[in-house]
Amino acid sequence: MPEGELTVEDLQQNTLTLDNIRLWDTRPLLESNRQLQQIRLYYEFSGADVDRYTFTEDDGSTNRRQVLISARELNYDQVPIEAQTWVNEHLIYTHGYGFTMSPVNIADADGLPTYFIKDIAHIPSDPTVARSIPLGSPRIYFGELTHNYVMTQTRVKELDYPSGSDNVYTVYGGQRGIALNNLWRRFLFAWHLRDWRLPLSADFTSDTRLLYRRTITDRVQAIAPFCGSIRTLIWWWPISRGIPAAGARMRSRFPLQQIPKPTISTGS
């Protein structure tokens, strides 16, 4: 049992701890995200993770805050059946887009999450968030729901994100993937993936790249098949002293998606 009494002085000396007492659970946050932030049926928030970020105030002072981050991944299974064509699956619906960030200890007056970052536009809630959280290009090519393989830098532009009643399109700007710049490689991967459209497609160019093994667990398993626990390896990897730039622990759920800083990469 704890000893002693909690005093006002104790509280004043531990304001950082008190300000970061977690009120939100991931489950109601995800439910709110699915109702308010999913945007389209083919997007999905599969999980949320707690992390801490340093925020720089107007006067230059800093403070660390706990936040909940959730990635907006693309779930191709939710694309309408009539639109599930080979071109859509492998050339157009290639990536998710963006994330939400919410403080763990605040709710709006209506009981919904307060968002530091939300919506497809990813407009920060205030200047402090804007200067503290780099947004980059939050395209999600590798994650938890990226089970299918895709080809990028083809003659067909990729769906980037919806904008009103229209869509914005893009071309993959990363360097990941395997170049399909000759017919031999196309036949090789057509055999490996059991997809005989690969050598026959007229949409490929000399710059076309194949991205496969796009889920985080698949990629770790391919890198370290000898490891008994993928979850253990994902947790251990970023904190090992033997790995350069291994700063903060990576959460078992996120990539990447990288969000040791919420600059969700373009896959490069």
Image (tube, rainbow, N blue to C red):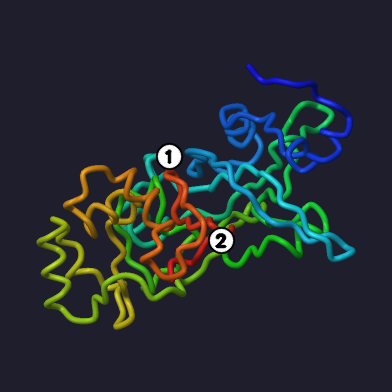
Gap in angstroms between the C-alphas marked 1 and 2: 21 Å
Q: In this view, does 6 lie to the left or right of 97?
A: right
Query: Tag on residue 124?
Result: none
Image spot of residue 11 (x, y percent): 83, 33
Q: Is residue 28 left or right of residue 257?
A: right
Looking at the rendered image, the disc whose residue lies closer to the viewer, 1 or 2, is 2
Residue at coordinates 28% horizontally, 67% vertically from top-left? 210
Question: 69 and 239: which one is in front?
Answer: 239
Image spot of residue 57 (x, y percent): 83, 59
What crowding class fits label 1: few (fewer than 14 Cα within 10 Å), some (14-19), or many (20 or more)? few
Image spot of residue 31 (x, y percent): 59, 29
Eyeballing the image, is 176 above or below 258? below
Residue at coordinates 68% horizontally, 48% vertically from top-left? 118
Query: Tag on residue 78?
Result: 1
Eyeballing the image, is 237 above or below 208? above
According to the picture, the residue beneath numbered tag 2 turns out to be 138
Disc 2 residue type?
Pro
Q: Give the quarter of the figure containing the N terminus.
A: top right
Which element carries disc 1, helix, strand or loop?
helix
Q: Is residue 87 left or right of residue 29?
A: left
Eyeballing the image, is 5 above or below 228? above
Disc 1 residue type?
Gln
Residue at coordinates 19% horizontally, 62% vertically from top-left? 197
